[in-house]
Amino acid sequence: MKSTYLILGVSLLLASGCHQHPLTDYRPLDQAGVGSATIEQLKPLNISDAEIQQVVKLKHSGVSDDTCVALISTAHAHNRLFTSSESVASLLGARYTESDILGFARADKLDTISGDAVMLRLIGLSNSTVQLILQRDLQGLPTLSSAAIGRLKNTGLTERQILERINEGMTEEQAEKEAAKREAVRNHSNTDFVRVRGRKPR
């Protein structure tokens, strides 16, 4: 009887110490080019089948093994599964580095910041301005959306002027009002009536 309890206790101990899905298929990772050492690092993270597919997508986007592990680990630290491979691909396409992406992930803003981060690149802002705006977001400081920034820039404001407004705490509503006012002035200046003189009809 004692031996039965002993065997049961050992079994329970092993079960509680094992965090891997017993039926998880790791072959897709190997086929995607993930190194065997990296796969061994992922196993203790209790990676799910869905996350394995996420890692495969990361590898197809050119993400390094170390960053794949860090992204999974960071997501789990925030008590969620990793589901952000598309956000990562978009950020890489917008010339953000893996270090940038890990910074977004560690701030738990990978998905929420990716859209604006990509748009800030498309607007044509300088790297230094983009970094300043994103750092404010990561630090929880008020900033403007990429849409508002793009609209202000299209009205002729310089990057320096836009940053001044952000630092002064300009809100989305205030940005929209200023952009609308500047657009109205610009449109009015392009519609001034010019009288064309010519011969009077006989």
Image: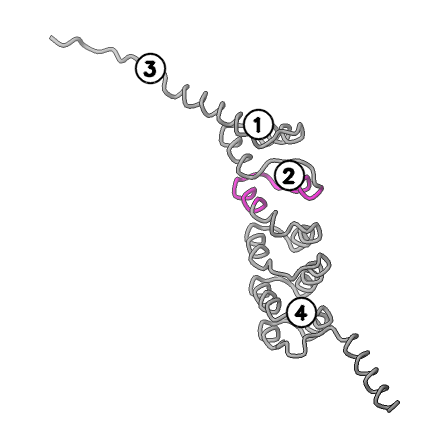
In the image, farthest residue toward the right: 2
Q: Could you say which quadrant of the image residue 170 lies in?
A: top right
User: Where, quadrant-wise, is the C terminus in this rendering?
Assistant: top left
Q: CA distance from mark 2 to mark 3?
A: 41 Å
Asked if the residue at tag 4 contacts the one at tag 3, i.e. Cβ–Cβ closer than 8 Å, the answer is no
What range is drawn magenta here?
116-139
Q: Amino acid at mark 3?
A: Phe
Q: Which residue is mark 1?
A: 174
Q: Which residue is mark 2?
A: 133
Rendered location of residue 122, percent (x, y): 52, 43
User: Where, quadrant-wise, is the N terminus in this rendering?
Assistant: bottom right
Which circle, 1 or 2, is nearer the viewer? 1
Q: Which mark is residue 193?
A: 3
Image-based side of 95 in relation to 40, left or right:
left
Query: Is 59 drawn above or below residue 105 in the view shown?
Result: below
Residue drawn 71% across the image and 74% down it: 20
Q: Amino acid at mark 4?
A: Ile
Rendered location of residue 151, percent (x, y): 51, 33
Query: Is 43 drawn above or below residue 61 in the view shown?
Result: below
Circle 3 — which element? Answer: loop
Rendered location of residue 85, percent (x, y): 58, 60
10 Å crowding of disc 3: few (<14), some (14-19), many (20+): few
